[in-house]
Image (spheres, rainbow, N blue to C red):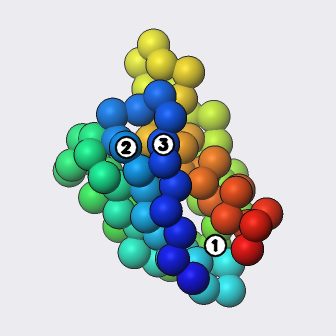
């Protein structure tokens, strides 16, 4: 199933991803640091959502209270709860 999550507090505006049996695919960030976010997408491809949440939850970006990886963790938590 494909999900779209509107991010909060980051340069990226949204995250789109697919979850198939709890496994993450095709993560795409809308906006933000293009190369870094493509890298995150490549690194989490094929990973279990729970593992990505454990690794990314709580990561901060500079002075901000969140980050793109943290927003991905929040998006995955929401998808797992509603999915």
SS under mark 3: loop
From the top left corner, tell me how far across and down residue 49 is, in percent.
Answer: 64, 67
Q: Which mark is residue 48?
A: 1
**In the image: residue 56, left or right of residue 45:** right
Which residue carries the number 3 mark? 7
Camera-near label (1 vs 3) is: 3
**Which mark sits nearer the N-terminus, 3 or 2?**
3
Quarter of the image with the N terminus is bottom right
**In the image: residue 12, left or right of residue 71:** left
Camera-near label (2 vs 1) is: 2
Which residue carries the number 2 mark? 13
SS under mark 2: strand
Query: Is 55 drawn above or below residue 82 in the view shown?
Result: above
Q: Judge by depth and name the residue closer to the eye, 53 or 83.
A: 83
From the top left corner, tell me how far across and down residue 4 is, in percent.
Answer: 49, 62
Q: Is residue 40 visible?
A: no
**In the image: residue 80, left or right of residue 36:** right
Q: Judge by depth and name the residue closer to the eye, 40 or 75.
A: 75
Q: Is residue 58 visible?
A: yes
Q: Residue at x 63, y 34 (%)?
A: 58
CA neighbours of label 1 inside 10 A, class few (<14), some (14 to 19), many (20+): some
Quarter of the image with the C terminus is bottom right
From the top left corner, tell me how far across and down residue 75 is, in percent.
Answer: 60, 54
């Amino acid at each position: 199933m494909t999900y779209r999550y509107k991010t909060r507090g980051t340069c990226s505006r949204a995250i789109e991803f697919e979850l198939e049996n709890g496994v993450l695919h095709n993560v795409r960030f809308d906006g933000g640091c293009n190369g870094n976010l493509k890298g995150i997408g490549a690194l989490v491809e094929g990973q279990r959502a729970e593992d990505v949440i454990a690794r990314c939850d709580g990561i901060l970006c500079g002075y901000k209270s969140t980050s793109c990886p943290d927003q991905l963790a929040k998006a995955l938590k929401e998808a797992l709860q509603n999915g």
